[in-house]
Image: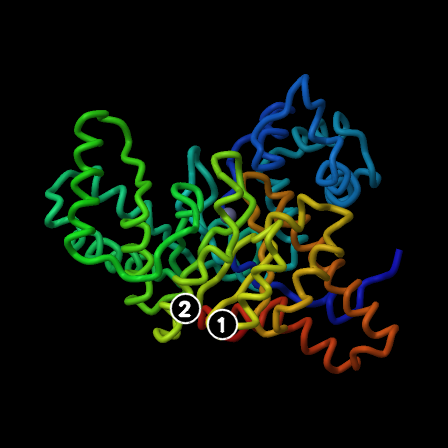
Amino acid sequence: MPSLLPYVEKLRLVDHHCHGVVRRDLDRAAFEALLTEAGVSGPLGGTLFDSQIGFALRRWCAPVLDLAPHAAPEEYLARRAELGFAEVTERFLTAAGLAAVCVDTGYAPEPQLSPAELGDAAGAPAYEVVRLERVAEEVAQAGGTAAGFADAVLQRLTGTVEERRAVAVKSIAAYRVGLDLPGERPTRAEVTAAADRLLRTDAVDRAPVRLADQVLHRFLMWAAVDLGLPLQIHVGYGDRDIDLHRCNPLLLTGLLRAIEPAGVPIMLLHNYPFHREAGYLAQVFPHVFLDVGLATHNLGHRSSALLAEALELAPFGKFLFATDAYGLPELYHLGALLFRRALSDHLQAALAEGAFAEPDAARVAELIGAGNARRAYRLPPP
Ligand SMILES: [Zn+2]
């Protein structure tokens, strides 16, 4: 097993896309449900411990809990329960070696650590990312008229971003309607008509509002562009709510072209299995960036191959580190560790062949691990 390049091992990473972790102890079923975004495991599929992420967890997380590498799942979970979630969270977030976290707070079906608490546990500053659809759904839930919807959303969005000092906003259009979105900014009349449909559905169902209308997703993305903040877009793989065939980033081409003159950074999140397509977009559009968070820890041992593919076309100034950790603090550690291994493997292979020079390898590691995120999100220097 090759050791890590020293400048990769020591590099404190800026995690530009991650989430809260749960504040409770977990039994085996609850733990496995959070291990992947599949959220399920059961008799037909066996156990998710028997997968790349399960093996990676036993290999790399067990030692953080003072167990031998490859500890059995039962032993691992027993030790985890013995230490308690607070101690476990502290250990994994410390082990991740993070310089900053940019936390998406838009999805929290149960109480989670706040960005500030995550930052405290990681020993790093925490920044918030506001989910666009959530803001619009809160406005719809509060009632009001279709004609007043656009202004109410814009006002609430501006207020939320200021109040939380958010560094970016995020769209989950991929989850709701897919990414095949027309590029043009929707007209006021189109937004009002779409708001009318949304508000009427709510009145009939009395259920929580769920925004899923391509006009409104586009309206929100353009609102983000007007704010001038980086716009994160969920792309590719996620949980099973997604129709993955509608989440190829190439479907965003028209929208990316339309947004380009505004100069607002567009952050394509996750991307797997379309990471090569995302790399292409990052090459041809100056404002497009990408990561392979979520897939990095799910691919476990194969994450080095993933990173190498993602970096085939993507310029080194356009690629970012992200864990996309959610629920389990282990995912912060795994995401960071597997990313460092993948980056080190890639650079070492290039150095061994004489393809890269050492000073360039060290510089690229810093860009990908931290510098690109600091530049795109205008984060203060460490
Ligand atoms: Zn995420």
Residue at 72% from the left image edge and 76% from the top image edge: 362
Vertical placement of residue 158 versus 132, above or below: below
Measure the alpha-carbon separation of dots 1 and 2: 8 Å
Name the residue type under label 2. Answer: Arg
Residue 168 % position (x, y): 40, 61
Residue 304 in which image quadrant: bottom right
Mark 1 Cα within 10 Å, few/some/many (few <14, many 20+)?
some
Q: Report the residue that reaches farthest toward the top.
A: 43
Marking on residue 260: none
Quadrant in which the N terminus appears: bottom right
Quadrant in which the C terminus appears: bottom right
**For this view, does 183 lie left or right of residue 337?**
left
Between 141 and 350, which is closer to the camera in this rendering? 350
Residue 94 % position (x, y): 64, 53
**For this view, does 336 lie left or right of residue 103?**
right
Residue at 52% from the left image edge and 51% from the top image edge: 248
Marking on residue 285: 1
Vertical placement of residue 19 versus 219, above or below: above
Residue 365 % position (x, y): 68, 71
Residue 219 % position (x, y): 27, 55
Name the residue type under label 1. Answer: Phe
Residue 69 in which image quadrant: top right
Q: Is mark 1 within 8 Å of ligand 1?
A: no
Number of numbered discs: 2
Between 364 and 275, which is closer to the camera in this rendering? 275
**Residue that carries the numbered disc 2 in the rendered image:** 257
**Secondary structure under badge 2?**
helix
Q: Are marks 1 and 2 in contact (CB under 8 Å)?
A: yes
Question: What colour-coding does the image apply?
Answer: rainbow
**For this view, does 136 lie left or right of residue 248?**
left
**Secondary structure under badge 1?**
loop
